[in-house]
Image (cartoon, grey):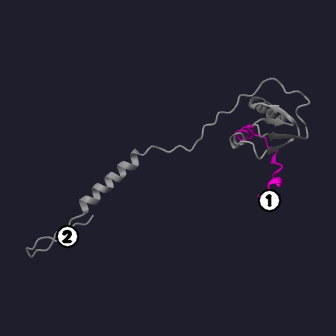
Amino acid sequence: MAMSGGKDDGSPMMEMNTTPLIDVMLVLLIMFIITIPVATHSVDIDLPVPNNTPPPPDMIDPIKNKIVLSPTDEILWNGTPINDGELVRNLEATKAITPEPELQFEPDQQASYDLSIRVLNVIKGSGVSKFGFVGNEKYRDFAK
């Protein structure tokens, strides 16, 4: 960094020497950067524990299965109410079928957003590959 020594005519130096100020500011900046904690970008999700009992043979359709979320916050698998553990069990059972059956997801317009997100996270975590949203055409026009 450059320093000015002033003039040799005996007059006082009229400008302030900013070199020490800049050096101190750079040291403080480096210290602040070092002490900032590392930001974590993970979100912890508690997934339900799968139910180890096999599902009834008539509960899982080998062609397509439909998950409906009711306005009363029930999860319906092909019209039958199930809980989170049974949902995980059914998803694992559908992955074992060859070819994998299609999974359709249809939340009711009055179903809670929290339940929808929770069920979608369970579906995503299960690794089901044939997945689709159905019934969205009902909401095409918002004025109705």
Q: Quadrant of residue 68?
A: top right
Instruction: Give above or below for 35 relative to 142.
Output: above
Q: Which mark is residue 141?
A: 1
| Spatial CA span between label 2 and label 1 | 70 Å
Pointer 2: what residue?
A: 15
Q: Residues within 10 Å of mark 2 (few under 14, many from 20)?
A: few
Residue at disc 1, secondary structure: loop
- Point out the stretch of residues depicted in magenta: 118-144
Work out whether residue 100 can be spotted: no
Q: Is residue 24 left or right of residue 75?
A: left
Q: Is residue 3 left or right of residue 104?
A: left
**Can you tell which of label 2 and label 1 is closer to the viewer?**
1
Residues marked 2 and 1 touching at CB (< 8 Å): no
Name, please, the residue furthest toward the bottom. Answer: 9
Instruction: Give above or below for 134 relative to 16.
Output: above
In primary-sequence order, the first of circles 2 and 1 is: 2
Locate the N terminus and report the quarter of the image it occupies: bottom left
Q: Where residue 109 appears, x then y in whole percent?
A: 77, 47
